[in-house]
Amino acid sequence: MSNGELQPLEQVCAPTASAAGPLEVLEPRDVPLGGPRAMTVRRTLPQRQRSLIGAWCFADHYGPDDVSRSGGMDVPPHPHTGLQTVSWLFAGEIEHRDSLGSHATVRPGELNLMTGGYGIAHSEVSTPATTTLHGAQLWVALPDEHRNAPRHFEHYAPTPSRLGQATVAVFLGSLAGQSSPVQTFTPLLGAEVVVDAGASVDLPLDAVFEHGVLADDAGLLANGTPLARGSLGYLPVARPELTLANLAEEPARLLLLGGPPFEEEIVMWWNFVGRSHEDVAQAREEWMSHSARFGDVEGYAGPVQHLPAPLLPPVRIRPRSNAARSARDA
């Protein structure tokens, strides 16, 4: 998905010092993507409080959205660099086309992972049969040695399994005996967990990972901390277990994300991840000049075949220090 903000902020994202004590809760902000009929998403990453969780650098949660009112999703061809997009749906379908030549349908419970490395373009359109659209769009920052990786697209449909009083589907990494075959450039965890009504479950965690719990339903507690729908609970490293409890009378769903702390600072602006202002400025210039860097998306039927990039901010934003590394080295 494109970051459809009309005036996207340039953000220098660095790992922050680990939180101690109770679960840290990141509250979402509403972001309208485009015009008055466009979707509004709830964004929890990045923000001033915390930029990354592992290599996860962007998290939008949206829906359930009545596409008869909102117009659904129709994102013309747009670019990405330095990242992987992770598409995960709870309801509805999205047609994906990219400049690698991929043509796929994103369906509930199935992973679509696109590597934007040096440069890729893609379009996303909710299908005509979709009446409700509901899901999450996530980005993963690529480490410096792989940030110019070639274009790639991968689809995977995990088989959910029962763990105590919960159902777990692992789409990236490993959890509770499940493993995904999808290869990533840094160790990652991505899983959907549905906790039974009035139930609780203990999940073993990799203690070298930090983790995020993105709540899709109300009534969830994560290690005793309440999570409102759309909020993201953060657990630092050295937490070997996560206890999830559902106080509601219906099953409650969440996404569990994780990875080792990402040691590199990144600059994010619009749909680009780089290491400096110059990186994203160069990517914007090449996209607007129709450079071969991004390629062409074939088969998109909308009137706009090349989504214009917003204007860059008028000033150069200085990098922030890596708080986690500074605290560790002090």
Image (spheres, grey):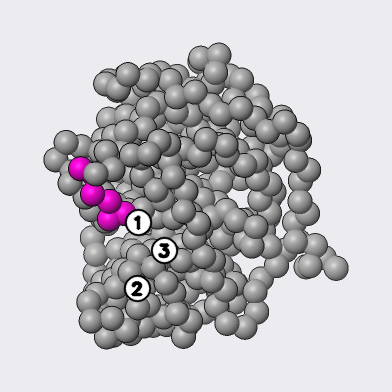
Q: Disc 1 or 2, which lies upstream in sequence?
A: 1
At label 1, which amino acid type do we have? Phe
Asked whether residue 66 is drawn in magenta, I would say: yes
Q: Secondary structure at mark 2?
A: loop
- Evaluate whether residue 117 shows in this view: no
The quarter holding residue 276 reads: top right
Q: Residue at x 38, y 19 (%)?
A: 305
Q: Which residues are magenta?
A: 63-68
**Disc ID at residue 171:** 1
At label 2, which amino acid type do we have? Ala
Q: Nearer the viewer, mark 1 or mark 2?
A: 2
Residue ranking furthest to the front? 36
Does 129 sit above or below residue 224?
above
Foreground residue, 224 or 33? 33
Q: Secondary structure at mark 3?
A: loop
At label 3, which amino acid type do we have? Gly
Q: Residue at x 65, y 74 (%)?
A: 19
Q: According to the image, label 3 marks what residue?
A: 230
Q: Disc 2 or 3, which lies upstream in sequence?
A: 2
Asked whether residue 309 is drawn in magenta, I would say: no
Q: Residue at x 44, y 74 (%)?
A: 227
Q: According to the image, label 2 marks what residue?
A: 218
Q: In the rendered view of the protein, which quadrant contains the N terminus?
A: top left
Q: Is residue 33 left or right of residue 263?
A: left
